[in-house]
Image (cartoon, helix red, strand yellow):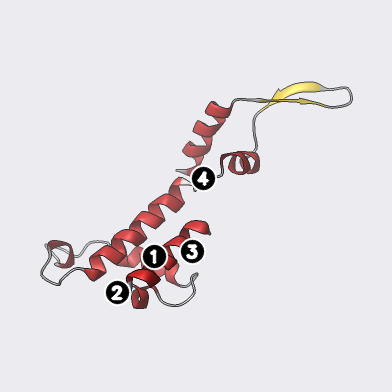
Amino acid sequence: MNVFERKVYRRILGPVYTYGNEKENWRILTNKEIYAGVKKPTIIEIVRLNRLRWFGHVQRMEENRIPKRLIGRPRSRSQDGVRGWKNSWRGTVAGKVHNREEWKKLLRMARNR
């Protein structure tokens, strides 16, 4: 996904004209130059944040709601994806779910990473 995103940004931003002592030519932007110029989160970061937001929403639901029940075979759950990220953050994710203010702080911290 990141490759496609960078390809789109390169298409939008276009080539860069560089000039030095004797050599003048056009070149494409490097990945670092793209991310420095765009200053937006990548697609992967946006997907992770949305998954985390959905995880908190589902955890606060009542037990009899459809997203909390398992229907058919157990599938990959949003919890499984979130647990992998938990180690890189301060504290536990599951403990902060029910306190809305703490959860909002955690989402803001994740967004600013």
Dot 4 lies on which element? loop
**In this image, 9 relative to 43: left or right?**
right
- Residue occupying the point 88% across, 22% down: 22
- Residue occupying the point 36% across, 61% down: 52
Alpha carbon separation for disc pair 2 and 4: 29 Å
> Which residue is more in the foreground, 50 or 72?
50
Residue where numbered disc 4 is placed:
40
Residue where numbered disc 2 is placed:
98
Alpha carbon separation for disc pair 1 and 2: 11 Å
Residue where numbered disc 3 is placed:
109
* Residue 93 locus on image (x, y percent): 38, 73
Q: Quadrant of the N terminus?
A: top left
Dots 2, 4 in contact, CB < 8 A:
no
Dots 1, 4 in contact, CB < 8 A:
no
Residue 31, placed above or below residue 17: below
> Sequence order check: which comes first, mark 1 or mark 2?
2
Alpha carbon separation for disc pair 4 and 3: 15 Å
- Residue occupying the point 89% across, 26% down: 21
Q: Amino acid at mark 4?
A: Lys
Dot 1 lies on which element? helix
Q: Residues within 10 Å of mark 4 (few under 14, many from 20)?
A: few
* Residue 45 locus on image (x, y percent): 45, 53
Task: Please identify the residue farthest to the right as the structure is shown.
Answer: 21
Residue where numbered disc 1 is placed:
104
Dot 3 lies on which element? helix
Q: Amino acid at mark 3?
A: Met
**In this image, 13 relative to 16: left or right?**
left
Looking at the rendering, which quadrant does residue 59 occupy?
bottom left
> Which residue is more in the foreground, 24 or 93?
93
Dots 1, 3 in contact, CB < 8 A:
no
